[in-house]
Image: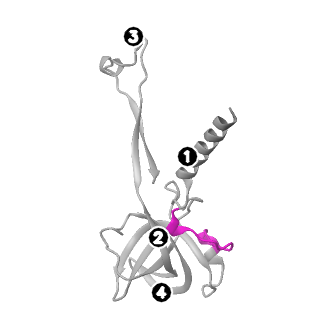
Amino acid sequence: MASLRIITALFLATLLSACSSLPDQLASTNENLITDYGQWLAQDADMESEIRLGGMIANVTNLKDKTRIEIANMPISSAGKPNLKANPEGRFVAYFDGYLEPMTYSEGRLITVLGNSAGEEQGQVGEYDYKFRVLNASGSHLWRIEESVIVQDHGSYLSPCIDQLHCRSMRMSVSKGRIVQEVK
């Protein structure tokens, strides 16, 4: 009986950790890791800090020996996932060594990056002059959004549904549903 409890506890722990674990490339042992954009902005731009932030890719530029990715910041969870329900809160730039394929790192993709603070740079968002915080990336993870549709069938008293197998084909009324988005 005790072994069954242990096996069940291990299974549940594994299941829960798989759902919310941080990807290896975003892991850090730094106790002073900054994961909040506002906190990063509040400190001196030239202060050395390790940063983990995420958001939506706004622009990708391949330079001679590195790639510049402009990211519209969104709050991230403890698993590093950008929060889809939050509005972007400013922008920052991440530099990656070497070439990154712009079709893979395309505008609109969700990304989380890990790196070290590297000051600021002046740039533009459209025609607006913007001062970007910069980090030199040491790791990143691209996320995908999975959508599922949840249909809510409401039977009427005129056509009760007993066996649940033929309910949908019997109904002539419109069903309501919703789309659920989840970052994976």
In the rendered image, the vertical position of residue 111 relative to residue 125, given as above or below: above
Q: Secondary structure at mark 2?
A: strand
Count neighbours of disc 3 (C-alpha within 10 A) and say few if under 14, some if 14 to 19, many if 20 or more: few
Give residue 140's mark: 2
Q: Residue at x 53, y 85 (%)?
A: 120
Count neighbours of disc 4 (C-alpha within 10 A) and say few if under 14, some if 14 to 19, many if 20 or more: few
Going from the N terminus, do you reach mark 1 or mark 2 first?
1
| Camera-side residue of 107 and 126 | 107
Q: In 3D space, how far apart are the residues under numbered discs 3 and 1 (Cα atoms)?
A: 43 Å
Give residue 122's mark: 4
Identify the residue under disc 3. 158
Q: Secondary structure at mark 1?
A: helix
**Quarter of the image containing the C terminus?**
bottom left
In the rendered image, the vertical position of residue 120 relative to residue 91, given as above or below: below
Identify the residue under disc 1. 15
Going from the N terminus, do you reach mark 1 or mark 4 first?
1
Going from the N terminus, do you reach mark 3 or mark 2 first?
2
Q: Are marks 4 and 3 in contact (CB under 8 Å)?
A: no
Q: Residue at x 33, y 67 (%)?
A: 104
Going from the N terminus, do you reach mark 4 or mark 3 first?
4
Q: In 3D space, how far apart are the residues under numbered discs 2 and 4 (Cα atoms)?
A: 23 Å
Q: Secondary structure at mark 4?
A: strand
Q: Position of residue 156 (x, y in %)?
A: 42, 16
Look at the image and give the residue range highlighted in magenta.
23-39
Choose top left, top right, bottom left or bottom right for residue 50.
Answer: bottom right
**Foreground label between 1 and 2:** 1
